Image (tube, grey):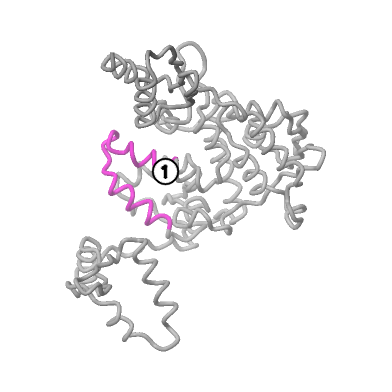
Amino acid sequence: MLFVDSPVTAKSMEEWLLADGYSKHKVAIDRLLQLRIFLEVNDRKKETSYKMNTKFQSNMQKYLVFGGTLPREPMPLSVTVRLPTLEDLEVYALEQWECFLLQLINSAQAERSTSFSSSMMRVFQRGLLSARENGAPKLTENGFQFLLMDTNAQLWYIIREYISSSEDRGVDPTDLISFLLELSFHTLGEAYNLNTLTDVQKHAIKDLADLGLIKLQQGRKESWFIPTKLATNLSVSLSDSSSRKEGFVVVETNFRMYAYSSSKLHCEILRLFSRIEYQLPNLIVGAITKESLYNAFENGITAEQIISFLQQNVHPRVATKTPVIPENVTDQIRLWETDRNRVEIIPSHLYEDFPSKEIFEAVCDFAREIGGLLWEDSKKMRLIVRGEYHQHMRDFLRHQK
């Protein structure tokens, strides 16, 4: 397909298949269409054909004909002594990531600060914190939801902000995306020479080290970087369960919650929707209460997000249970949310004392057309309209008079 310029019919493609390959072929075609590498074309006879995306096709042709850059080779062990184990590397990556997140939401809580400039931190905080004139910034609705996300989803949010602000730093976003994709295919735990990087890549690598995507090391003569699990997960689907970390939360039927963690970040996240009672070196004890959940709902966190967070981070000892979170707890969380949302307050205007039935009905029809009618009483000739449509209603009424 790479060197065929005209569309190829689906029937012609099926002739290329073996008898048992049809189902795999269908899956492959669907995937290529989702990735927009293939485009579906229908001719006059309504026969389905497929054509390769011209941009992808031309770039792939260039790559095959003229060649591309070879993958970066890891450094030999004779040069790099004492590389960290995969376990050490994972601990390092999570510590760096948690430290960054703590600084992102509350710099006072972070034990050490990153080398990101204040302007760069503001880029990451965009949409997560709301700046207030007198006082500390406050988490926005998106900020609360961000903290409850899976690590991979959080990472993609931060990387997206990092790329979108690259032009302001004088960096071509295409070069940055290319490097991040290349980095995601490096081997976890292997050492790669820093001298093989361009100036743009060397600058980016320092920022990525602050995020915990890579670990920098200095030898006697050479310097190298080691990709962590966060970097290699950039090419992993967000729904891929293999990239999930081990959980730490146990929720009991009496709404008590035990979190086996020494992380300050975990404590801050749990504080978003529960009452923290005490904290031991490796255990956080709390309770899910009506008041703590109402605070969470007030901040824009939904019941489903809280339940999803608890389910994703459940301790391995209770992970085999069905359900992993007691049903009475999840049901009550949902009930408290619906209880809070029983009454919806909508700013509105009441219109009454119409001179005739005809004018009242005309006004009702107009309010219904513009989507502003909330309630009507045809007997007493009264109606209630959404507040934002008041000016439209006044203009219409003036015209009726």
Residue 159 position by quadrant: top left
Give the percent coordinates (x, y) of residue 338. 64, 34
- Secondary structure character of the magenta stretch overall: helix
Q: Give the range drawn in magenta.
A: 158-184
Q: Relative to 101, is 183 on the left or the right?
A: left
Residue 173 position by quadrant: top left
* Camera-nearest residue between 253 and 240: 253
Give the residue at x 55% y 32%. 144
* Camera-nearest residue between 128 and 399: 399
Identify the residue at the far right of this view: 254
Query: Does the magenta-highlighted stretch encompass residue 168?
Result: yes
Quadrant in which the N terminus appears: bottom left
Q: Name the residue under label 1.
A: 159
* Camera-nearest residue between 267 and 322: 322
Q: Is mark 1 on a helix, strand or loop?
A: helix
Give the residue at x 70% y 25%. 291
* Relative to 392, residue 242 above or below: below
Of the residues shown, which amino acid type is indicated by label 1? Ile
Q: Count residues near mark 1 (Cα–Cα under 10 Å), then give few for <14, some for 14-19, many for 20+.
A: some
Give the percent coordinates (x, y) of residue 15. 31, 86
Give the percent coordinates (x, y) of residue 68. 26, 64
